[in-house]
Image (tube, rainbow, N blue to C red):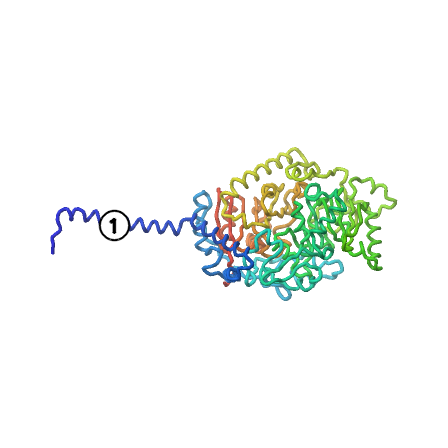
Amino acid sequence: MAVPTSDQRKRRPFLLSLSLFLLVSALLALAFLFLDPSAQSLSSADATEKAEETASRPDDTAAAVNADAAAGEGGGSSESPRLDADKGAAATEGVADDDGGGGGDEPAAKVRWETCRPGRGVSAADYIPCLDNMRAIKALRSRRHMEHRERHCPVAPRPRCLVRVPSGYRPPVPWPRSRDMIWYNNVPHPKLVEYKKDQNWVTKSGDYLVFPGGGTQFKTGVTRYIQFIEQIMPTIQWGTHTKTVLDVGCGVASFGGYLLDRNVITMSFAPKDEHEAQIQFALERGIPAFLAVIGTQKLPFPDEAFDVVHCGKPLLELNRVLRPGGYYIWSATPVYRQEKRDQDDWNAMVKLTKSICWRTVVKSEDSNGIGVVVYQKPASNSCYLERRTNEPPMCSKKDGPRFPWYAPLDTCISSSIEKSSWPLPWPERLNARYLNVPDDSSSTDEKFDVDTKYWKHAISEIYYNDFPVNWSSTRNVMDMNAGYGGFAAALVDKPLWVMNVVPVGQPDTLPVIFNRGLIGVYHDWCESFNTYPRTYDLLHMSYLLGSLTNRCDIMEVAAEIDRILRPDRWFVLRDTTEMIKKMRPVLKSLHYETVVVKQQFLVAKKDFWRPGK
């Protein structure tokens, strides 16, 4: 055996050191590759993009099958368009801690989550606690005034269960294609297809529900109907003079969906009734809508909010929410049919509209014989004061509370016309300040300006740049504590819409929001919201959690957030470090991925996880 030379003996330690260095470097590189949060975030974005691309290709059967298998109830595979909950959380939490103060090492809260079991007659996948409280509904003494369609929220204990995901659920069809077609498995309700087949509301085509744009009074298409209204009444000026519309008994909300082409935002509503899932269809399509009925209680809107009201009864409540000088558009059989029942209804309508001083602007029929009548609410009090009989009477302080949350319907005419004025044309009205709002003062003006400036900066510089949110797949957005609507105003150029919620107990800023040409409702977040599960892409809560959890449990709030939010979508909490540290472990227990940005924003992404899956 050859004896090593002195030079070889000198090089041996060097070679051993070099080998060890290369081995350690390789191990560090591998560790960095698997733990690098940016790489993980990129894979998440790629996966979401891939899922959306699949959803946008109706003819690619193989891709649809893969997406269906990946996004099925509670499950996933290597093809799934979501991150593994544990790996994703670990990766994104690294980003949070780098930005400081996130407390990224908190463990998930020890919560035993259970799947909701709403009881007989209620779909487990479509459970709405305040509208599906069958025990309370069965105990009602009367249903004559639609009491059974109103809110009856569970009190003790409040729901803290999780609604299951329908089998075959997949990422929604992207907007704007979703206006015309949605995945059937996401809203698997065929009853309306058969029930309204002669009115062109909705049809089933393979894996899709297709919306041809028909309706009860516009079977040949809602586009022609909208054009017809504009032709007979040019002063309506869709999208400039008229910006906010309330569509009552809206069906699948095609009227509101197609008004978006005219830059009009429509709040569509209908009850949860035998017209199965009509509002769920609307929201799945990406059209603003929520569940409500005009029964015995006021709608959750301020007085004089909407520029136009489309259809619906009773008129005293619609008069309350219609802006002075605004239009009421009625398209129904009494307008154009001559049968005795229709004529009796028409005569009653003439008498009632005259008693509340609505002026008939135009009455006309289109080429198909469908009639429309347009009324205008007075812009001053003079007509009310000149009536021969004070019936219905003008509302006074003794008539009860003006705030509409759980308040009985008025039997009088509400009016503050003397201090009202029509907003500026759109888009100037978005950032204009108005005097006819509660708590009008110079300090209110200053708060409005600060709020507008802050959200314009925060959205453009932080939300778009620093949040792990795919804005291209975000359509239905809710601001859970909307303030003056600055968050929604800053997003107005994006192809999305915002439901602005003003919580009960917070300053009443909802009139400001409507004056800006935006939409919203009042709500108490210790109760369930009037929407189906899985109807929003992004929920946004700003500095509300502290006051909210003084009245209800944080688990109940989290369960409602989870119920409303679509799988693979986002919840954003802007709050103190203390509140973020309280909410983050709860969201982790739901298998949400969480990131804390700039110490004041918690961004959480919902998983497909359900208990027992």
Give the residue drawn at x 67%, y 34%: 441
Q: Quick check: can you spot residue 577? A: yes
Give the residue drawn at x 73%, y 50%: 310
Q: Residue furthest right?
A: 388
Q: Could you say whether the residue bearing mark 1 is in a helix, strand or loop?
A: helix
Give the residue drawn at x 55%, y 41%: 459
| Closer-to-camera residue (149/71) | 71
Q: Position of residue 382 (x, y in %)?
A: 82, 39
Other-residue count near label 1 (Cα within 10 Å), few / some / many at <14 / 14–19 / ≥20: few
Which residue position holds label 1?
Answer: 19
Q: In which image quadrant can residue 241 be found?
A: top right
Q: Residue furthest top?
A: 442
Residue 424 falls left or right of residue 92: right
Q: Position of residue 66 (x, y in %)?
A: 50, 61
The amino acid beneath tag 1 is: Ser
Q: Position of residue 248 (x, y in %)?
A: 71, 53
Q: In which image quadrant can residue 340 be found?
A: bottom right
The answer to whether 205 is drawn above or below residue 462 in the figure is below
Q: In which image quadrant can residue 424 be found?
A: top right
| Closer-to-camera residue (400/350) | 350
Q: Position of residue 140 (x, y in %)?
A: 71, 61
Residue 208 falls left or right of residue 578: right
The answer to whether 335 is drawn above or below residue 458 in the figure is below
Q: Residue furthest front?
A: 367
Q: Quick check: can you spot residue 153? A: no
